[in-house]
Image: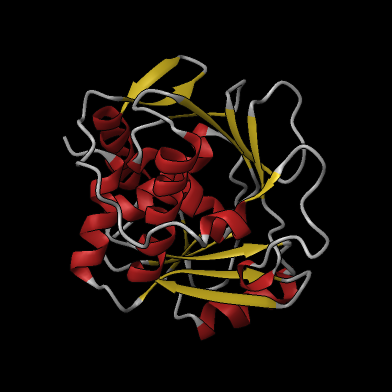
Amino acid sequence: MPAPDALLAAALARDPAGPLLTYYDDATGERTELSAVSVANWVAKTANLLRDDVGTAPGDRVAVLLPAHWQTAAVLLGAWTAACVVTTGPADTVFATGPVDGAGEVFALSLAPLGRGFAGGPPAGTRDYSADVLGMGDRWSGRPVPDAVPALETAGGTVSAGDLVEIALRRATELGLLAGDRVLTTAPWDGPTAWVDGLLAPLAAGASLVLVAHADPDRLSAKAEAERATATLGADVEGLRRL
């Protein structure tokens, strides 16, 4: 069974230039569209940040305390590419929107449009993810992740990289995801179950995402039509099947 990095590699091989992840924020009016190539670029930079700057080694814990966002996808996939164990619990390296007590290295994300960092500098005790990651290499030179490497910490224990992909494939089937689906989602990304359903399962199925934050229900139908959505997750849109 392949590891999560292979899911992004498959998306690159399938359609490198088409939209893989389109992000809307109805609170700010932001719309950001990323192809598989663009996502892979951010993922590689994040993995390089972890390995070359922080010095993480395979099996090291990385906490992701972020909302559903296109940069969150880059952080999650980057951590798995670097063979880290992703968690929402204590960890030496943390990605969050602000300071985290007890963490050794905290990368703060402003989640500002266009991936901008903090205009006045990051919160005290943190580093600006956007500023630091942009200086990293665009390609990942590490080896493919072995399937037996631990990858995700859940309430039931640690899941290996291969088992994580197997879970994602199973959830894709259970949700009714189809290859080529364009999934409009308003569901939160608040932990392992949400990361699988909201990110890994669509990747495993060969689908793409339209991720809407602070969603205005009255504008979802127009977004679904504009983005040619075929299914929804966490929202109801007339004429589309809900996963």
Q: Is residue 7 above or below residue 36?
A: above
Residue 39 location (% of width, % of height): 40, 63
| Residue nearest the observer in this picture, 243 or 155 | 155
Residue 196 in sight from this viewpoint: no
- In the picture shown, does residue 222 fall above or below 191? below
- Please state the horizontal and vertical placement of residue 153, each as a whole percent of the image: 46, 22
Q: How is the image coloured?
A: secondary structure
* In this picture, residue 222 sits left or right of residue 87: right
Q: Residue 33 placed where, x, y %? A: 50, 75
**What residue lies at 20% left-to-right and 31% top-to-bottom?**
146
- Residue depicted at 40% across the width and 46% down the height: 47
The one nearer the camera, 146 or 198, is: 146
Residue sitting nearer the eye, 138 or 225: 138
Give the residue at x 66% y 67%: 116
> Residue 162's x, y, as percent?
24, 31
The quadrant of the rendering that contains the N terminus is top left
